[in-house]
Image: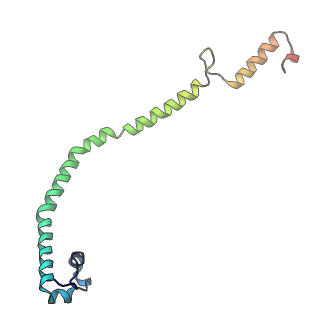
Amino acid sequence: MTPSCPSDLALEAHLLEPAASALGTHLSSCADCAARLAAMERQGEDFRRFVYPATVARIEEAARHRGWRLWVLAPVPVFAAAALAGDFARQAVVGQLGEDGFLVDEAALGLNRLHQILHAGAGWDAVGA
């Protein structure tokens, strides 16, 4: 192998697209690089025949067994969002409860106060008080 020999990465690129590679002339004249390229081809073939099928089969098997867990856990974010929305609504309502525990309506409070003043005999003069 000489300093002008291509790197392993360049040889891999050549394996992917030999027609587009500029390494053809070097590979035909350099026995070391041709041997490296042949070894890479054998390793790639071994990977495609042995490693890849076994890996894909194990991944597919794991995905089949994991699928039910996703369906069980899918509603969890929906329930969490509903709980948060319910808590916000509860806080909004609790903030408007009167002393007797009933909802307080600001407009109704004003009318109730006006009614009390008028029926207490104070007349319209006490409305501004």
In the depicted view, which residue is nearer to us: 53 or 120? Answer: 53
Could you say where residue 117 lies in the image, as x and y percent from the top left? 80, 14
**Corner quadrant of residue 125:** top right
Vertical side of 1 occupied by 72: above or below: above
Query: Relative to 110, is 18 on the left or the right?
Result: left
Could you say where residue 48 lies in the image, as x and y percent from the top left? 14, 66
Vertical side of 27 occupied by 124: above or below: above
Residue at image location 15% in from the left, 88% down from the top: 28
In the depicted view, which residue is nearer to us: 47 or 61? Answer: 47
**Corner quadrant of residue 98:** top right
In the depicted view, which residue is nearer to us: 10 or 41? Answer: 10
Could you say where residue 20 lies in the image, as x and y percent from the top left? 26, 83
As drawn, the residue found furthest toward the right would be 125
Query: Relative to 13, is 36 on the left or the right?
Result: left
Residue at image location 65% in from the left, 22% down from the top: 104
Could you say where residue 14 lies in the image, as x and y percent from the top left? 22, 79
Query: Relative to 111, is 82 on the left or the right?
Result: left
Quadrant of the drawing holding the C terminus: top right
Residue at image location 24% in from the left, 84% down from the top: 19
